[in-house]
Image (cartoon, grey):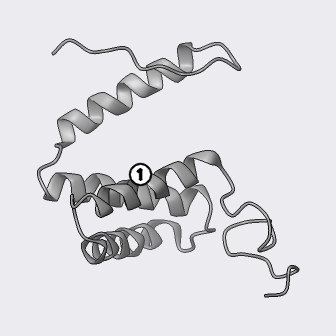
Amino acid sequence: MNSDYKLPFTNKTDDQIVFQNPWHSQLFAITVQMSEKGNFNWKEFVEVFGETLKKQRTYLNNLNGSNDYFSCWLNALEEILIIKKISNRDTLTLLKEDWIEAYLSTPHGKPVNIKNRSV
């Protein structure tokens, strides 16, 4: 492959980093690992992801392939976790709230840690 070929969703060529942001690659890896461990099969995920993309295009008209694309990916992963009864909306909402609180209260350059919630 020509090394000047630009990969989709990146500003990089095929011999450089593929994902624009670390969370994109982390989300991709988590999804692949969950599928490989049997939580859902890849076809199921792709179907949910496709529906999520269709819904999002209705609101955005066009996805640019960066954060918007991976936000759809995250929404699809959350949806399949709910469908498969691995999690539920309330738990995912609490986790998001904990994450927001953690990263907003963490000094710049320090690792973000979510505190254990006593439920």
Q: Position of residue 41 (x, y in %)?
A: 25, 70
Looking at the picture, which amino acid does disc 1 mark?
Answer: Ile
Residue picked out by circle 1: 30
32 to the left or right of 42: right
Whether 95 is drawn above or below 75: the answer is above
Q: Front-most of 59 and 96?
A: 96
Question: Quadrant location of the N terminus?
Answer: bottom right
Q: In this view of the protein, which residue sits in the foreground, 10 or 1?
A: 1
Residue at 43 percent across and 61 percent down: it is 73
Residue in the image at 69% along x and 64% along y: 18
The part of the image, by quadrant, that contains residue 64 is: bottom right
The residue positioned farthest toward the right in the image shown: 4
Give 36 or 102, whichever is nearer the viewer: 36
Q: In screen coordinates, is 5 left or right of 99?
A: right
Q: Could you say whether the residue bearing mark 1 is in a helix, strand or loop?
A: helix
Relative to 38, does residue 30 appear above or below in the rendering? above
Residue 8 rendering spot, x and y as whole percentages = 68, 75
